[in-house]
Image (cartoon, rainbow, N blue to C red):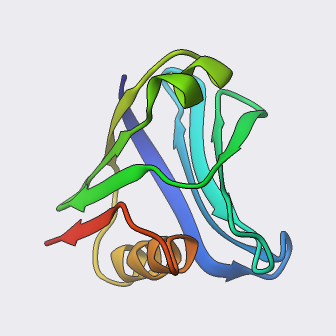
Amino acid sequence: MHLNATVSASAFDEHYQMALVYCFDRERNYCFSLSRFPEEDEIEVMVLDQINHKVGDLSVELRGSTLNVTLDKSLAAHLDGHTTYAIGLLGIEGPERDDLCDALRKIFEGKQGLKLED
């Protein structure tokens, strides 16, 4: 699935008490998020609005202003069936991109599957 989304990201969100990346495509009215509570080992993937599932591992690559996410078929089946997401991140430059990278590093702390490129 291809999305063009605004993004908010935090290595530790004070309100939700977790690391999170939240992407929202206004045109499609579709959200995609990754989050992880500090005391949990699993990453929560959410799509649409509140369809979520926790997983031990997944593949996420940030290349420039595009976030590419690959889910295995069993995880996709728990969500909305998509195994790949190409999310064009709108207005993600400088400090916003740094915040996104920090949040992704925190979400993937101690895990495989994260690749960050300029």
Q: Position of residue 54 (x, y in %)?
A: 70, 47
Q: Locate the N terminus by quadrant.
A: top left
Count of all numbered marks drawn on residues in the image:
0
Q: Nearer the viewer, residue 78 or 104?
A: 78
**Would you place residue 6 above or below residue 103 in this image?**
above
Q: Position of residue 5 (x, y in %)?
A: 43, 42
Residue 57 in the figure: left or right of residue 60:
right
Q: Locate the C terminus by quadrant.
A: bottom left
Q: Nearer the viewer, residue 23 or 44?
A: 44
Residue 92 in the figure: left or right of residue 6:
left
Residue 93 in the figure: left or right of residue 83:
left
**Would you place residue 60 above or below residue 37 in this image?**
above
Q: Residue at x 46, y 82 (%)?
A: 102
Residue 104 in the figure: left or right of residue 43:
left
Q: Residue at x 69, y 68 (%)?
A: 41
Q: Position of residue 68 (x, y in %)?
A: 30, 45
Q: Position of residue 6 (x, y in %)?
A: 47, 50
Q: Residue at x 34, y 51 (%)?
A: 89
Q: Residue at x 64, y 24 (%)?
A: 79
**Would you place residue 69 above or below residue 42 in this image?**
above
